[in-house]
Image (cartoon, coloured by chain):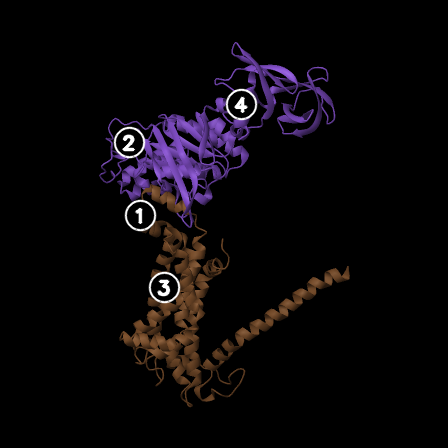
Chain colours: A purple, B brown
Amino acid sequence: MQQTLAKAPVHAPAESPVPTASSAPAKGQTLAKALSIRHLDKSYALGGGRRLPVVTDFNLDLAPGEFVTLLGPSGCGKTTVLRTLAGLEDFESGEILLDSLSIARLPAHHRKIGLVFQNYALFPHMSVFENVAYSLRLRRVAEATVRSEVASALAAVGLEDYGPRMPGQLSGGQQQRVAVARALVMHPDLLLFDEPLSNLDAKLRVQVRSELRRLQRRLGTTALFVTHDQDEAMSLSDRIAVMKSGRIEQVGAPEEIYARPATLFVAQFVGKVNALPATILDEANGQVEIEMLGTRLRAPSPATGLPRDVLALLRPEAVTLGGPDSGLPGIVEDIEFLGDLTEYGIRVGDTLVTSVRSALGDAWKIREGDRVGIGFKEQTIHLLPRTEAAV
Amino acid sequence: MHEIAFKPLLRQAGLIVLGALILLWTLLPLYHMVILSLTPVGEGFAGKLWPDAPTLDNYRIVLTQDNYYLSRFWLQLGNSVLVAFTSCVFVFALSLTASFAITRLRPRFAGFASHMALITYLVPATFLAIPFYQVMGSYGLLGSRWALIITIATFATPYAIWVLQQNAGSVPRELDEAAEIDGASPWQIFRLVYLPLMVPTIVAVGAFAVMLSWNEYLYAFLLLSDEDRITLPVMLGQFLSDDSAPWPLLMVSGVLYSLPPAILYFLARRYMATGLAAGSVKG
């Protein structure tokens, strides 16, 4: 496989009073560029002068070569951000900078941004070769260069021999790779992915996302990925930006997002979580003593000060199960077999606590109605102010 | 048990009978036309199911223009072809650009414009004959084939826009956006993405426009007068004005005139089914 793609000659955009990314000198440029999105605001007209805000004061920075994922539920504005970056949507205010140079007012094809669409958007009447070559042909690149560039792009995604085929003759995974090759052929400074794995079946999705990550690392191109699938986000990203209602709730490494969510929404969006009301009793030596479910526990002290009333967040895997006398007594209310894990709902007083155990290799069988004792891995407890967390 | 097996059989038999009746109803005029075309000119009104002495001489007469009524047969057939072809080009030019603009560029009032185009069908075409005659007269186009071409394009274009517009919905917008990011202008998107993907509907719309023009009689009769410029249906109509007109020759002309649309339909039948059906249900 080819490691890097050769530079293709492209037309420079029209002169602009503002220095722009694509008007910067090409010599000495690396593929990786930093992206800065500053105070981006976008809304849609509803009629009667009213507007529906879809992205509000959106700020995000991507380091050169970084892979960042926008994660959020449908309608949270993540695709709108992506389309705005690609130049397919206008926006009211804000700034988009690639290596400190504004691209906000450039037309889509002058931004040097590659976009991989959710449905791949391959031209069904053109061969794989022609699909990848399309942008080069529009720019009247010499035929010999087109051939070598397309060959390089197809080699980068492992489809060297698929040039003559039509998109309809390819599997979903192969189509997705052609879409990536088409985005790569123009040597983009930034790669955007709009839920490109959502049309693949579960097994293929896992395989393709690994390939995608390897490819991005090899090419070193800065990438922004959009998904609503937390597994995808966790496995692919250097950092994740969790979005809600057009705003970023939290940006951080996947481990940080999972272990130390900034809000209850983030905690719940990236996985199952027990959000249990607790009261802070004391704080000393980097630890806080809390009372939760009628028992006293020691949790890591949060970086910022917290009110007395808090929510203690515990992932199901941080809740252990034992015999009736081994911890906080509870009754097994429901059991859900998930394949690799089994999930248990344990009733403790008025509260339902979720725990998971490996589904295999455990001699102790738990049945609904059994009395059990539950314990907590105290070092994984994450505290949030109860009022803020409830938002 | 018997009832269960009997019902589908009865239903199928009923459908076969119904189909046979419809087929008979459809083929009877064609049969009549073909039989008369093979009947000697003098026996045109004998009313026989099969002529006593079938002849192909009528075809020779028509093809060699060896009759007063048919002295300009090839010229008038050529007029029909010219009008049909040119109308079709006009319909394509107008409906393809309009449907592209409405569905892909989405200007303001696009929906209103497309609805307004269809409103033209609220008035029966017959009622518009006199206004059209006056308009063409005002522009000095009476007697010109352009008058007929413009009229046919006017009637065919709104339907063509509607069918194309409905089918354009099945072409993902992401294709346009991908092309835009690649650097394509709206014209390049139209030419390199929209047109190739709309081929089935374009064929269907073209066939519709050609057939509308091919079968046009009223406006051709009204707007064209010179025998060198009239289309074949107008000439065939002149047979009816004369009691002694040779009907077998009229039928030969009818047979020959019906061949091009039949061939066209045969060639485009695959697209006719998919292309026109696309307009019936929004995808």
Residue B218: image x %, image y %? 40, 77
Q: Which residue occupies the extreme bottom position in the image?
A: B244
SS under mark 3: helix
- Which of label 4 and label 3 is nearer to you? 4
Which callout, 1 or 4, points to the residue nearer the camera?
4
Q: Which mark is residue A101?
A: 2
| Residue B59 figure quarter | bottom left
Mark 1 to mark 4: distance in Å? 52 Å
Amino acid beneath label 2: Leu
Q: Which residue is mark 4?
A: A384
Q: Position of residue B159 (x, y in %)?
A: 42, 64
State the separation of the CA atoms marked 4 and 2.
39 Å
| Badge 3 density bin: few <14, some 14–19, many ≥20, Cα 10 Å | many
Q: Judging from the image, what secondary structure is the residue with disc 1 in? A: loop
- Foreground of the two, B251 or A53: A53
Where disc 4 sits, the SS reads: strand
- Left or right side of B231 for A338: right
Name the image quarter holding the N terminus of chain A.
top left
Q: Are marks 4 and 2 in contact (CB under 8 Å)?
A: no
x%, y% of residue B105? 36, 51
